[in-house]
Image (tube, rainbow, N blue to C red):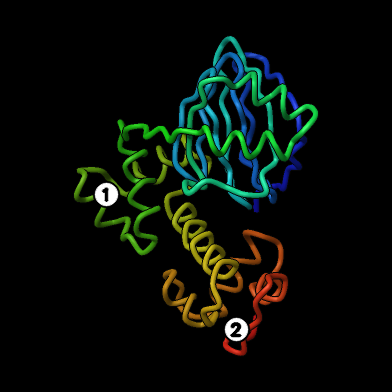
Amino acid sequence: MDDFAPVAHGPERWAGNVRMPRHRHAHPYAAIVLSGGYEECGSGGRFRVGPGDVLLHGPFSVHLDRFMPKGAEIFNLLLHDTPSFRCGVGRIADPDAIVRSAETDPVGAEAALIANLREVVQRDTEWPDLLASDLLKDPELRLDAWASDHGLAAETLSRKFGKLFGITPAGFRTESRARRAFDCIVQSDAALAEIALRSGHADQPHMTRAIKTLTGVTPLHWRASIPFKTQNAGKA
């Protein structure tokens, strides 16, 4: 399991050509790029960002970062609400205004960010990006069939995807399933057994292990921590 890394509200400065290993954050946050640029490979795919771009990270997002030669200056804003595109990249016209607001009124800055954020759709240009996109759409995707359809050997698929994303395609698929299940657990009152099957898990115990690996605790913990309770929740 990748290490949990705390997110500190405020500015960060990164030197050029630095690589931050794969890690995860429990709390949702937005990384507002003020200068420089970097590439992030993680839960939502691969994104290349520069000044004015905003990388959104949902709860328990996992990613690695590669900073460009000039490095980057970032402002991290913790989120309590999230836009409809929970993991991805957006853009704001005046990032400095959001930062100034966040220094004295983080709640107001969050509201202003979400109100003014425009989603940016980055095109899938290389096959690892296409594979990540397809795995996010279909966590039951057969990797051998995908490799064959794209003229790739299974070994090439695993090696090159792993080099870019820091995880094998099979591991990425497992995390995608777990994240899909987690979202259903905390956003609905559907039975856990039903969520397990809907999210591509073999059964409820299989999903429980995946959720515990992703978040550190079981589905029953999350179901007990949200406002609604249901007799159909099942057991962790």
Residue 38 sits in quarter: top right
Q: Is residue 73 above or below residue 211?
A: above
Residue extending farthest to the bottom is 231
Residue that label 1 marks: 147
Q: Amino acid at mark 1?
A: Ala
At 56% from the left and 11% from the top, the residue drawn is 69
Label 2's element?
helix
Residue 96 sits in quarter: top right
Residue extending farthest to the top is 70
Q: Amino acid at mark 2?
A: Ala
Label 1's element?
helix
Q: CA distance from mark 2 to mark 1?
A: 38 Å
At 61% from the left and 34% from the top, the residue drawn is 112
Q: Residues within 10 Å of mark 2 (few under 14, many from 20)?
A: some
Residue that label 2 marks: 233
Q: Position of residue 80 (x, y in %)?
A: 67, 49
At 73% from the left and 30% from the top, the residue drawn is 102
Q: Is residue 182 left or right of residue 177?
A: right
